[in-house]
Amino acid sequence: MQDRQGVNGERAQRVLARERDAFVAARPKSQALSAQAAQHLLFGVPLHWMNDWSTPFSLYVDSARGADFSDVDGHRYIDFCLGDTGAMFGHAPPAVAQALARQAQRGFTTMLPGEDAVAVGAALAERFGLPYWQFAMTASDANRFALRWARAATGRQKIVVFNGCYHGTVDDVFVDLIDGEATQRASLLGQVYDLLPHTRVVEFNDLAALENALADGEVACVLAEPAMTNVGMVLPDPGFWREAQALIKRYGTLLLIDETHTISSSPRGYARAHGIEPDLFVLGKPVGGGVPCAVYGFTAELAARAQKAKLDAPAGHSGIGTTLTANALSMSAMRATLDEVMTDSAYAHMFALSERLADGLTATIARYALPWCVTRVGARSEFQFCATPPRNGSEARAAMDDELEHIIHLYLLNRGVLITPFHNMMLVCPDTREADVDRLLAAFDACLKELCANSC
């Protein structure tokens, strides 16, 4: 690692080697479990991306509650990853745990609705402003199903996404701009058909490119986060969404907003807080307090078109929904989350601590004169290795440095602080304390002090 991002490369390598050794020495039980798992789990983990953490082997969790979790070796951690938003309201919120316990005695799944479904539908309509809803097990499925409805309702096949987007494992979205050309993502395993005939990709905040993609009237839907969150955070320019919505309507295209991450911005979502009016709305993992579930909503006009498309179609499987979709356990979790967990007071607490965190990160970075910036979306903050916030996916991706991220993440982890592994995102939850934020900031400061020795 050469000197880059304002960091002394030789020094960083020594820090990485020391931190890896410290991780191994302190976690013999996790190491033993990793060895056992390798005998039967592909790549030695339940899902291959669990190897993407900065650790020499998997960290095994014993229990998680509120803003903390403990590993099998007895170490306690402050969790600022929070399941990459799945546990955005803390681990095992009491209201959700109690609802699950009650429902567990009454049945898990019947493939029929219960009273909770009625209550959840009404709560979603009141909170997010769309009158009609359907359910899925994950945001990936919700996005996939919503795209099917969009195509069925419009009779169009193509979609538009923004470069660097992430909407789960929906095949259609794995198209990037490489040197200005739409390119199917090389990392996509087992893809046997070409995505390019049906997916167009443009840069976020580029209104001219968006209009060019929509102008022929062949696009069913624009699928977007209102602020990009997974390639490093990218915020919309002032007025971008006002102009973008006008373009989308002009060309008869639908707007699908995915708020699975940006729900950090408001209990009613980023779109409603900023005057964005989607035709379709997706919310995934946090809506059930961490229980697998997702929701997607329709405007009244689109709901009528979608229902007509279904009624006009031949009988048979629509390709939408799974057997466990809207099961009784997930519905009870969603009802408890919406009624008792996703409250205005919870968000007020989260916003205050997130502001404290973002301000502290900014001050620490300035103290070491590093060319980095900090971006915040409500309860979510992120530091990025660029002097000014990126405006699109290409700029955000260019600022990434996987090796430096791993060093910082492992340093923090060895001091009892966990942040999201795939970039530098941090979330606070209703159970996060000021002392937790200060502990992260102290560890971050100590890390930069070491990395910048003889260079800052």
Image (tube, rainbow, N blue to C red):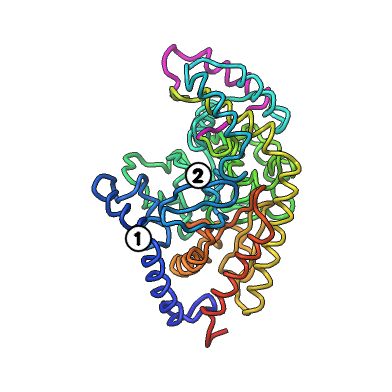
When asked about the image quadrant of residue 244, the answer is top right
Please report the bounds of the magenta region as a residue range.
292-319
233 and 359: which one is in front? 359
Tag 2 near tag 1, CB within 8 Å: no
413 and 50: which one is in front? 413
The residue depicted at 32 percent of the width and 52 percent of the height is 33
**Does 190 sit left or right of 264 as displayed?**
left
In the image, residue 385 lies in the stretch drawn in magenta: no
**What residue is pinned by disc 1?**
28
Residue 197 in the image: above or below residue 420: above
Q: What x and y, as percent, mark residue 129?
A: 72, 30
**What residue is pinned by disc 2?**
200
Q: What x and y, as percent, mark residue 337?
A: 64, 34
Element type at mark 2: strand
The N terminus: image quadrant:
bottom left
Callout 1 environment at 10 Å: few (<14), some (14 to 19), or many (20+)? Answer: few
